[in-house]
């Protein structure tokens, strides 16, 4: 089958492309290269189109001949979203609606990247999909607006599945999608101590990028037409414990460095994945320490 992978030169998108190729599908990459990197797909035998998702006309001309759409294009830097709110809204919300409009016109199924950031600081963990959505930063707000759009278009019989990613990590993570693991890794490569913003007691649910790519394909291949699903492991790790694991794997003797907490930083995040496992028949496979060890081979 032929699939559009929008944001396919990005961190998660290129992993979806690779897994589609392994399954003998035909992925076509659409990416503005604003944050995506052509190097991620240059060795792959795939068609590529440099298009910004804000350009409805160009998108429509390309996408109309596909069997489905994977939408991974977004601006994702929480701190940057405070200072570039209009740009984040234009790309993440208006750009996403362009994709939903095209999907409606050509009757295409969409699997897209939502985010656990829609929950904000949850009242309890693990977080179920029906938990209150109350984002605490502009990035999370754009993802919630996308969900409102998905709900709106679903009522018009458009097949849209939103995957609420928790903390995605893996090799090749750079730029605005560089989460805490990549930031710690970059410090360790320079033989410098990891920097923790806040106390380090913040809890995160880290999910390996290849597992996330598998979840996307499982959602596309499922008989499910609509809904939101948590993509995580259901296991929490404190930021401080994460830093200690990575220092241990590096073989360096370093002490953690602490600085002031950041605005918009969620305190606790943990996925309840029961719905995802039962409906999409997907479950994570990579344990955190095994995933982290890949950085130090």
Image (tube, rainbow, N blue to C red):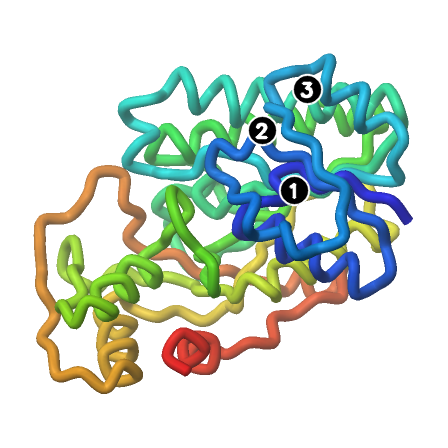
Q: CA distance from mark 2 to mark 1?
A: 9 Å
| Picture layout, residue 15 above or below residue 277 | above
Asked which secondary structure carries label 3, the reply is: helix
Foreground disc of the pair 2, 3: 3
Q: CA distance from mark 3 to mark 1?
A: 16 Å
Query: Considering only order in the chain, which callout, 1 or 2, is on the residue closer to the N terminus?
Result: 2
Residue 226 shows up from this direction: no
- In the image, farthest residue toward the front: 43
Circles 3, 1 touching at the beta carbon (< 8 Å):
no
Residue 124 shows up from this direction: yes
User: Residue at 61% of width from left, 65% of height from top?
Assistant: 211
User: Residue at 87% of width from left, 36% of height from top?
Assistant: 66
Q: Position of residue 68 (x, y in %)?
A: 83, 40
Circles 2, 1 touching at the beta carbon (< 8 Å):
yes
180 relative to 11 in the view: left or right: left
Query: Considering only order in the chain, which callout, 1 or 3, is on the residue closer to the N terminus?
Result: 3
Quadrant in the rendering for residue 124: bottom left
Viewer-proximal residue, 72 or 48?
Answer: 48
| Picture layout, residue 228 above or below residue 212 | above
Q: Position of residue 157 (x, y in %)?
A: 85, 28
Residue bearing the label numbered 1: 162
Residue bearing the label numbered 3: 98
Asked which secondary structure carries label 1, the reply is: strand
CA neighbours of label 2 inside 10 A, class few (<14), some (14 to 19), many (20+): many
Q: CA distance from mark 2 to mark 3?
A: 11 Å
Q: Position of residue 136 (x, y in %)?
A: 33, 35
Residue bearing the label numbered 2: 146
Q: Position of residue 113 (x, y in %)?
A: 59, 43
| Picture layout, residue 266 above or below residue 207 | above
Viewer-proximal residue, 241 or 187?
Answer: 187
Viewer-proximal residue, 254 or 200?
Answer: 254
């Amino acid at each position: 089958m032929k699939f559009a992978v929008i944001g396919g030169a990005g961190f998660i998108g290129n992993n979806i492309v690779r897994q589609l190729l392994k399954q003998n599908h035909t992925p076509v990459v659409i990416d503005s290269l604003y944050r995506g990197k052509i190097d991620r797909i240059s060795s792959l035998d795939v068609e590529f189109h440099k298009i910004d998702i804000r350009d409805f006309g160009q998108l429509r001309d390309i996408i109309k001949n596909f069997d489905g759409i994977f939408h991974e294009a977004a601006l994702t830097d929480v701190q940057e979203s405070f200072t570039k709110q209009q740009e984040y809204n234009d790309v993440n919300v208006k750009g996403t609606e362009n994709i939903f409009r095209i999907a409606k016109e050509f009757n295409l199924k969409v699997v897209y990247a939502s985010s656990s950031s829609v929950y904000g600081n949850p009242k309890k963990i693990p977080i179920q999909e029906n938990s209150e959505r109350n984002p605490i930063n502009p990035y999370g707000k754009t993802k919630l607006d996308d969900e409102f759009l998905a709900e709106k278009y679903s009522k018009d019989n458009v097949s849209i599945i939103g995957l609420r990613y928790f903390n995605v990590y893996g090799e090749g993570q750079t730029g605005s999608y560089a989460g805490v693991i990549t930031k710690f890794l970059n410090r360790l490569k320079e033989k410098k101590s990891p920097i923790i913003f806040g106390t380090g007691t913040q809890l995160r649910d880290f999910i390996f990028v290849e597992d996330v790519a598998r979840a996307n394909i499982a959602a596309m291949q499922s008989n499910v037409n609509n809904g939101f699903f948590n993509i995580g492991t259901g296991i929490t790790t404190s930021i401080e414990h994460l830093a200690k694991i990575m220092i241990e794997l590096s073989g360096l003797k370093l002490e953690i460095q602490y600085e002031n907490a950041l605005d918009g930083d969620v305190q606790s995040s943990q996925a309840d994945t029961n719905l995802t496992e039962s409906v999409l028949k997907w479950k994570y496979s990579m344990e955190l320490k095994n995933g982290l060890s890949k950085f130090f081979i």
